[in-house]
Image (cartoon, helix red, strand yellow):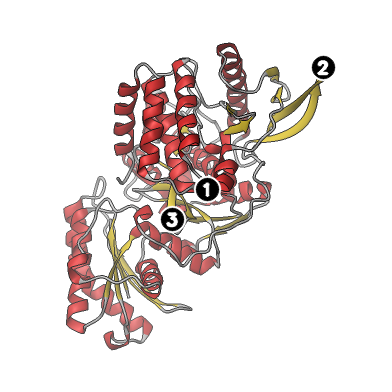
């Protein structure tokens, strides 16, 4: 039995190894505005018993038949979590049943895997409070990218309230967006693997004040925000070398988002698995499924271990029941570009062509490709002039969306670390190289091990298309954040090695201490820390 109650929905689901036996829910709908935690908790307290009774009735079971009580331990709203945790403890003690606290995002992953028969997918989890790209690596689910401010669903609900749409606002925005035709200049905010939605909300409200049609604003908000998360999702697929996509969370019911993800998967030759819409929303069955897998893998808890955790992250939980994909057959492929070998006036070169993304609005796609093409050319030119190890730039062709540059021989840093392992020498070199880049007043913008090549005993930076030639401490800290997080997610790197990287970096940059302070603040901004 699984009890869910992290936000607006209280739910009880019962599953076994094969089936969902029942799932019964009751959702709190605020009379106006957003969710008030105390009012939602009162709703949960009033409805938890009827919900449990209905789930037992629908499954034709009694509490004697239940083997395990699982409940949502976090993340979520504290008052709501306490109600469900108290109910779970009461059932556990009264009927002498074992109890397990479950991470809420883990529930979304596992119910999706159960219903879709997914093996080892990259999951896009989009709900009110969460926007995360998640993949299983080295025994746990890792967060490869997430919102740095508000969740996508939260942004949509806030926008809906401003235009008089009651909670939840997403479905009505989707309906109005179908009547929109004009793409407005909404900010496309992607930094590496992370996204930001607060600026989209501000821009959308500004366009309404200027007299733009509400249908066009809804259309633009969806087109831009959904394209952002689909882009990050695609990059994560190539980054982890996985072939399956799983889409889950309340916003995953949106058909435009589903179409975008399916189009991206089809274009990339991947397999898109879309969770049944009935189980995209918060539900007890997903908590039951995750609890079942945890218990079968040996996880046990005592009553005193079942305190709630409103900031509970999925990467804190062991998940040994998943077997990681080992297929590295397309390690040299890219999410945004096609790489061809060529020759430039007798020099061996590579031609990088920025692909048309069929999931994106045509105008938006052209704008993004052109901006990144020109930015990459400008930054590579500056790197060459500053003596930063990078491929020599030969040509930029705006009509073909192509860039021609020196061909480097050698593995990516990702491949090198995977085959050779992490050692002190390579960590020192990484820290110094990034420090030298930043000391030259250049930020990279997408600094992951896949965008560094090991060639002739040097570290070469490639694909700086999302970087800046007028960076501030925030841009430098973003580079550090990306390389540190990606190394933690993909490789066994202890904290001592990461500290060493930071130390070597700080020695190479004059204002290293200021950048480190910015990095610490950035780490605390993550949705759940």
Query: Where does label 1 land, which residue?
Result: 257
Quarter holding the N terminus is bottom left
Q: Position of residue 505 (x, y in %)?
A: 41, 26
Measured in 3D between alpha carbons, the distance from the residue under mark 3 to the one under mark 1, in whole angstroms, is: 23 Å
Q: Is residue 486 left or right of residue 161?
A: right
Question: From the viewer's perspective, is the residue at label 1 or at label 2 nearer?
Answer: 2
**Residue 345 disc label:** 2
Quarter holding the C terminus is top left
Measured in 3D between alpha carbons, the distance from the residue under mark 1 to the one under mark 2, in whole angstroms, is: 45 Å
Q: Quadrant of residue 72?
A: bottom left
Secondary structure of residue under mark 3: strand
Q: Residue furthest right?
A: 346
Q: Would you place residue 157 above or below residue 217 in this image?
A: below
Query: Where does label 3 land, which residue?
Result: 141
Residue at image point 55% right, 48% down: 240
Q: Nearer the viewer, residue 137 or 10?
A: 137
Q: Position of residue 368 (x, y in %)?
A: 58, 28
Question: From the viewer's perspective, is the residue at label 2 or at label 3 nearer?
Answer: 2
Q: Nearer the viewer, residue 294 or 227?
A: 294
Question: Contact, CB < 8 Å: mark 2 with mark 3?
Answer: no
Secondary structure of residue under mark 2: loop
Mark 1 packing: few (<14 Cα in 10 Å), some, or many (20+)?
Answer: many
Question: From the viewer's perspective, is the residue at label 3 or at label 1 nearer?
Answer: 3
Residue at image point 43% right, 57% down: 140
Question: Contact, CB < 8 Å: mark 3 with mark 1?
Answer: no
């Amino acid at each position: 039995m699984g009890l869910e109650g992290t936000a607006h929905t209280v739910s009880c689901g019962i599953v076994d190894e094969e089936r969902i036996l029942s799932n019964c829910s009751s959702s709190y709908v605020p009379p106006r505005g957003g969710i008030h935690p105390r009012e939602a908790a009162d709703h949960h307290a009033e409805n938890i018993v009827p919900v449990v009774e209905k789930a037992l009735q629908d499954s034709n079971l009694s509490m004697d038949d239940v083997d395990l009580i699982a409940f949502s331990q976090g993340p979520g709203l504290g008052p709501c979590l306490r109600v469900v945790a108290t109910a779970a403890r009461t059932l556990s003690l009264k009927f002498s049943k074992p109890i397990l606290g479950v991470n809420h995002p883990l529930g979304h992953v596992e119910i999706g895997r159960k219903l879709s028969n997914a093996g080892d997918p990259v999951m896009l989890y989009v709900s009110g409070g969460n926007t995360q790209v998640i993949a299983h690596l080295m025994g746990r689910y890792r967060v490869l990218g997430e919102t740095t401010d508000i969740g996508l669903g939260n942004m949509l609900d806030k926008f809906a309230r401003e235009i008089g749409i009651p909670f939840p606002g997403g479905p009505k925005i989707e309906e109005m967006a179908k009547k929109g035709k004009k793409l407005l200049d909404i900010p496309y905010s992607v930094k590496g693997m992370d996204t930001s939605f607060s600026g989209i909300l501000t821009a959308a409200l500004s366009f309404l004040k200027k007299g733009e049609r509400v249908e066009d604003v809804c259309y633009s908000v969806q087109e831009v925000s959904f394209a952002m998360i689909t882009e990050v999702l695609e990059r994560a697929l190539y980054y982890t070398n996985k072939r399956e996509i799983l889409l889950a969370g309340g916003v995953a019911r949106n058909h435009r988002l589903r179409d975008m993800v399916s189009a991206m998967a089809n274009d990339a030759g991947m397999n898109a698995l879309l969770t049944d819409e009935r189980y995209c929303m918060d539900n007890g069955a997903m908590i039951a499924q995750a609890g079942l897998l945890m218990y079968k893998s040996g996880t046990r808890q005592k009553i005193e271990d079942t305190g709630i955790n409103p900031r509970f992250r999925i990467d804190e939980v062991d998940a040994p029941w998943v077997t990681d994909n080992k297929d590295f057959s397309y390690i040299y492929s890219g999410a945004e570009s096609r790489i061809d070998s060529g020759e430039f006036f007798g020099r061996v070169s590579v031609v990088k062509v920025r692909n048309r993304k069929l999931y994106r609005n045509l105008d938006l796609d052209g704008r993004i490709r052109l901006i990144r093409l020109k930015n990459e050319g400008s930054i590579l030119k500056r790197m060459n002039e500053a003596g930063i190890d990078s491929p020599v730039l030969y040509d930029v062709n705006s009509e073909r969306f192509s860039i021609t540059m020196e061909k480097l021989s050698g593995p990516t840093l990702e491949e090198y670390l995977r085959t050779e392992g992490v050692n002190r020498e390579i960590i020192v070199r990484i820290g110094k190289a990034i420090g030298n880049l930043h000391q030259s007043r250049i930020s990279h913008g997408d600094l992951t091990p896949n965008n560094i090549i090991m060639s002739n005993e040097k570290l070469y930076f490639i694909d700086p298309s999302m970087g800046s030639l007028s960076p501030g401490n925030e841009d430098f800290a973003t580079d550090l954040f990306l390389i540190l997080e990606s190394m933690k997610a993909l490789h066994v790197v202890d904290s001592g090695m990461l500290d060493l990287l930071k130390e070597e970096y700080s020695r190479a940059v004059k204002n290293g201490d200021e950048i480190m302070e910015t990095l610490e603040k950035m780490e605390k901004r993550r949705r759940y820390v």
